[in-house]
Image: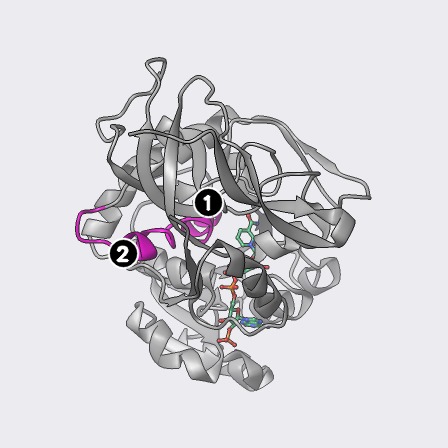
Amino acid sequence: MSVPKTMKAVVENSAQDGVVVKDIPIPPLEDNEVLIKVHHVTLNPTDWKHVDALSTTDSIIGCDYAGTVVAVPGSVAHQRDHIKIGTRVAGWVHGGHYKTRGAFAEYLKVPADLTFPIPDDMPTEEACTFGVPFYTAFHALKYSQKGAWPPGLDDSWFLVYGGSSGVGLFTIQLAKMMGHKVVTACGARNIDLVKSYGADAVVEYKAGENAINMIKQITGGGVHKALDCISLPESNAFTIACFAPGKGQMNVILPPDAKAVSVRPDVDVQMTLLYTLWERAFEFGPRDGPKMSFPALPQELEFHRELVVRIPQYIAAGFKALPIEKRGGINDIEQGFADMRDGKLSGKRYVYAIA
Ligand SMILES: NC(=O)c1ccc[n+]([C@@H]2O[C@H](COP(=O)([O-])OP(=O)(O)OC[C@H]3O[C@@H](n4cnc5c(N)ncnc54)[C@H](OP(=O)(O)O)[C@@H]3O)[C@@H](O)[C@H]2O)c1
């Protein structure tokens, strides 16, 4: 397959407070990396948050992709059977951070063992949703098991706060796979959706105190495990109020609100950041402000590799892609960021055709 010298990519353009679609060189491959021609991408909140405040100069924006392998250097170390030219693959990268690694581009480079083969009967439009939200559900719940992975079966109630979000819909499916009964809180318009992804009981989060009381009633006094998929101060407060007396494990995916979670010192609150699953040390924080340093964590990379191998098995076992709305091509992505900032995205993913 012939590969051009340049490609179109959505690139950070902080000088103009946004992004620009421009021609840049095809990224050079490093050891263990393959080149993918990108067919479809989907947007995550982290993409527009990077554009607004986090992305580094000239970095390629975007995490979640699905495409076809077009170049496999002989040096690929962790070769897997599926890494051949012509194989359809999907996954996610740490977008908005590197000048040569980002999903919203015609071509993308990725380590060979960190991309998964798309099942034959799954279109790339759907496969690209198995990115950041899917991995986040697994990454967060892995922590609730305190390192035991794969987790043993547990038939207790599990609360998924924000079940209609991308992370939420995958967390519902994962919690069910782990044996839990799932109660979730979402908006009224998404009640049928979360049930169709496996939720056993649903409450509307806008019902506030009434919704919390309903969760306590449904679960016979409250839960001992929960993932707050929205992780804002109000969702932290709602989630922790649903815990039964005694020890509990609450997972969050944005820094927890200290005041909200302080009401239950016996509930262990763990935050996870998905980007730690890559093998590279990195700095994370506002473009013009203080940053946190994250080291390369070999055990996280190993978990990432193992999860990649298991994804086709999970899909075969019934894991569903997220609902999608097709939204045009690479030039339309910036409008998607605007709509997400405005809170218009509900219960689905915006998907864009790239090449
Ligand atoms: N730590 C990490 O590594 C990590 C990884 C992934 C995501 N995140 C963060 O996690 C958050 C969720 O990401 P996502 O991709 O799953 O989001 P998403 O799919 O874009 O979320 C959209 C959904 O959020 C729901 N929602 C909004 N406000 C809510 C509230 N106050 N209570 C309950 N539900 C609410 C809406 O529900 P209704 O329409 O039903 O009202 C909507 O369906 C984002 O802030 C993202 O940046 C962090």
Instruction: Pick whichever, 209 or 228, lies toward us.
Output: 228
Q: Is residue 197 above or below residue 277?
A: below
- Give the quadrant of residue 258: bottom right
Quarter of the image with the N terminus in it: top left
123 in the magenta segment: yes
Q: Residue at x 35, y 28 (%)?
A: 113
Q: Which residue is mark 2?
A: 319
Relative placement, left or right, of 174 versus 105 is left
- Three-letter amino acid code at disc 2? Phe
Residue drawn at (35%, 75%) of the image: 193
Q: Could you tell me which residue is drawn at 50 percent across and 68 percent down?
A: 162
**Label 1, label 2: how far apart the Cα atoms are:** 16 Å
State the scheme by which the image is colored. Answer: one colour
Choose between 181 and 106: the one closer to the eye: 106
Mark 1 within 8 Å of ligand 1, using the beta carbon: yes
288 vs 229: above or below: above
- Residue 37: image location, x then y, percent: 37, 39
Kind of residue sitting beneath label 1 = His
Viewer-proximal residue, 229 or 106?
Answer: 106
10 Å crowding of disc 1: few (<14), some (14-19), many (20+): many
Q: Nearer the viewer, mark 1 or mark 2?
A: 2
- Estimate the x, y position of residue 242 in percent, counting from the top left: 54, 71
Question: Dot 1: what SS?
Answer: helix
Asked whether 134 or 8 is in front, the reply is 8
For marks 1 and 2 on the same chain, the one whose residue lies earlier in the sequence? 1
Mark 2 element type: loop
Residue 102, image x, y percentages? 52, 40
In magenta segment, residue 59: no
Q: Which stretch is magenta?
A: 119-141
Answer with the quadrant where ligand 1 appears in the image. bottom right
Q: Which residue is mark 1?
A: 139
